[in-house]
Structure formats: structure tokens, C-alpha cells
């Protein structure tokens, strides 16, 4: 009778080990996010940006790994949200405050506070609403996700570090406007692509892998240039995702109406 008990204990330990892995990645991400503040304090803004990008990549991996190895948990979900507040709310706000917003005095600090509060509200709403929508809506976020928001508010700094100097930007004017705009997008209900469920034909897989490898190659070689272009593409995709969402929503409502009419006839 003792042997089955030992087997059950081993299985439980394996399950705990699976849960620990994605949570460890999440904690590593928050450490990297906090380290970006330290880089900003010492004026090493290029390293601060790289730290935020690495934190964003980890944030995109931990949840997928948890689902892949069937290690999702409520603790992991809450931990991920707390990490996002720090890495993509507090850290970008501090970085931009040390770089430019401090020149605006109290107004600059107020803008930082508003942004961080909007990140926290956006994540709280996400935790409450997750898993309650029809399956087709899983491909959309409600508002801009916090990792994207964190990178977007850093765009003026990233642009200044890049080789793409097409426009002469008045940062004291542009940075506050961008912060307010992104803050509104975070708490808005504007649909943005989530890219959670991407189906790729098997014969196209090799091209997808090639595109991913090429992008990360550009990110390693032309880091800040690649991030600036990615940010511009993301901004352009926001109205496109809204149009796509509206079309899908209309089709979904029309289908429900048709089904109800069919039931009435029967």
C-alpha cells in the first residue's frame, strides 16, 4: 500500500516543477525590468531600452510556455500582471522621466503617474474579463496591451538613439502628448490584434521561420532602427485591427440573428 503513495508524491512534485518554470521566467522578467531603471539612473538609456525589450520578449514567452506544458495557475496569472505593471508601467515612466519629462517639473511627474495608473487599470480589467468572450474575440485585446504600451512611450527615446533621423522632433512637446495618447489607448476598448491564435499552413511554416529569424537578426544588428520601424507598424495596425474587429463583430451578430430567425420558423 505504501508504493502507490510514493508514486502519487512523485507526480505531484513533477506538477509543481512545471508550474515553477514559467513563474521563474516571469520573475526574471521583472528583475530585468527593474534593472532598466538602474540603467536610466546612470544615464545608460540604450541599455535601459534593451532591458525593456528583453522583458517584453520574456513576457511573451512565459504564458505560452505555461500553456504548452500545461502549467497555468492563478498565481502565475496574478504574478504576470504585477510584473507587467513594474516592467511596462513603472520602468518606462521612470526612464522617460529621467530622460526628458523631468524638464517639465511637476507636470512631467503627473504625466508619469497617469500613465502608470492606466497600466494598472488596464491589467486589472484584463484579469477580470479574460476568458469571458466568444472564441473569435480571443484574437483581439481590449485596448493596447501593457508591453506594447511600455515600448510605445519609449519611442521618442528609441528614435533619438536610432539612425533614422528623418524629422526634427521637439521632444518636450511630443513626449507628453505621446504619454497621454498611449495612456488613453491602454484603458480604451479599442480592439488591437492579440496574435494568440495564428494558423499557418504547413507549406508556409518554413517562410514564417525565415521571417522570424530575419527579424531577430535585424533586431540584433540594427536594434533601435528595427524597434522604431516595429513601433510605427504597430501604430498603423491599430486602426486596421479596429476595422477588422468591427467586420467580424457584424458578421457574428448577423449569424446570431439568422440562427434566431431559423429557430422561430421551426
Image (cartoon, rainbow, N blue to C red):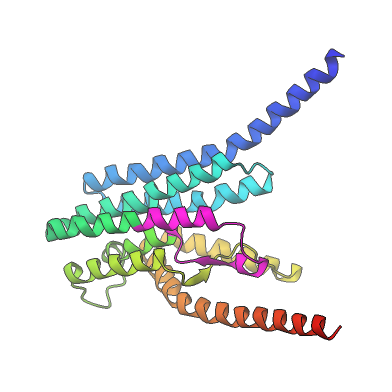
State the predominant SS element of the stretch in magenta. helix
Point out residue 217 in the picture as x, y percentages from the top left corner.
Answer: 50, 60
Residue 104 location, quadrant = bottom left
Residue 233 location, quadrant = bottom left
Viewer-proximal residue among 241 and 160: 241
- In the shown orientation, is residue 74 left or right of residue 12? left
Tell me which residue sits at (63%, 44%) in the image: 72
Q: Which residues are magenta?
A: 118-147
Point out residue 8 in the picture as x, y percentages from the top left corner.
Answer: 78, 24
Tell me which residue sits at (49%, 53%) in the image: 57
Point out residue 226 in the picture as x, y percentages from the top left corner.
Answer: 41, 66
Magenta-colored stretch includes residue 132: yes
Which quadrant, please, contains the C terminus?
A: bottom right
Magenta-colored stretch includes residue 164: no
Tell me which residue sits at (20%, 68%) in the image: 171
Q: How many marks?
A: 0
Viewer-proximal residue among 36 and 138: 138
Task: Name above or below for residue 159 compared with residue 37.
Answer: below
Which quadrant, please, contains the N terminus?
A: top right
Point out residue 232 in the picture as x, y percentages from the top left corner.
Answer: 40, 73
Tell me which residue sits at (69%, 66%) in the image: 205
Q: Residue furthest top?
A: 2
Task: Name above or below for residue 81 compared with residue 170.
Answer: above
Task: Name above or below for residue 69 compared with residue 236.
Answer: above
Amino acid at each position: 500500500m505504501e508504493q502507490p503513495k510514493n508514486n502519487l508524491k512523485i507526480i505531484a512534485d513533477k506538477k509543481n516543477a512545471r508550474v515553477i518554470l514559467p513563474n521563474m521566467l516571469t520573475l526574471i522578467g521583472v528583475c530585468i525590468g527593474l534593472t532598466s531603471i538602474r540603467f536610466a539612473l546612470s544615464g545608460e538609456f540604450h541599455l535601459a531600452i534593451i532591458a525593456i525589450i528583453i522583458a517584453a520578449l520574456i513576457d511573451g514567452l512565459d504564458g505560452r510556455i505555461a500553456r504548452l506544458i500545461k502549467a497555468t495557475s492563478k498565481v502565475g496569472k496574478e504574478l504576470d500582471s504585477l510584473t507587467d505593471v513594474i516592467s511596462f508601467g513603472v520602468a518606462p515612466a521612470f526612464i522617460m522621466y529621467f530622460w526628458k519629462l523631468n524638464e517639465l517639473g511637476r507636470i512631467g511627474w503627473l504625466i508619469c503617474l497617469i500613465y502608470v495608473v492606466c497600466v494598472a487599470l488596464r491589467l486589472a480589467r484584463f484579469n477580470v474579463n479574460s476568458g469571458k468572450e466568444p472564441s473569435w474575440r480571443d484574437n483581439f485585446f481590449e485596448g493596447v496591451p501593457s508591453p506594447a504600451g511600455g515600448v510605445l512611450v519609449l519611442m521618442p527615446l528609441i528614435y533619438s538613439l536610432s539612425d533614422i533621423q528623418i524629422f526634427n522632433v521637439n521632444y518636450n512637446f511630443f513626449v507628453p502628448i505621446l504619454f497621454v495618447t498611449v495612456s488613453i489607448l491602454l484603458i480604451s476598448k479599442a480592439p488591437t490584434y492579440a496574435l494568440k491564435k495564428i494558423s499557418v499552413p504547413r507549406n508556409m511554416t518554413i517562410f514564417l521561420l525565415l521571417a522570424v529569424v530575419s527579424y531577430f537578426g535585424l533586431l540584433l544588428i540594427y536594434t533601435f532602427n528595427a524597434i522604431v520601424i516595429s513601433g510605427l507598424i504597430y501604430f498603423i495596425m491599430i486602426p486596421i485591427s479596429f476595422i477588422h474587429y468591427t467586420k467580424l463583430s457584424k458578421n457574428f451578430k448577423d449569424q446570431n440573428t439568422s440562427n434566431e430567425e431559423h429557430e422561430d420558423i421551426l
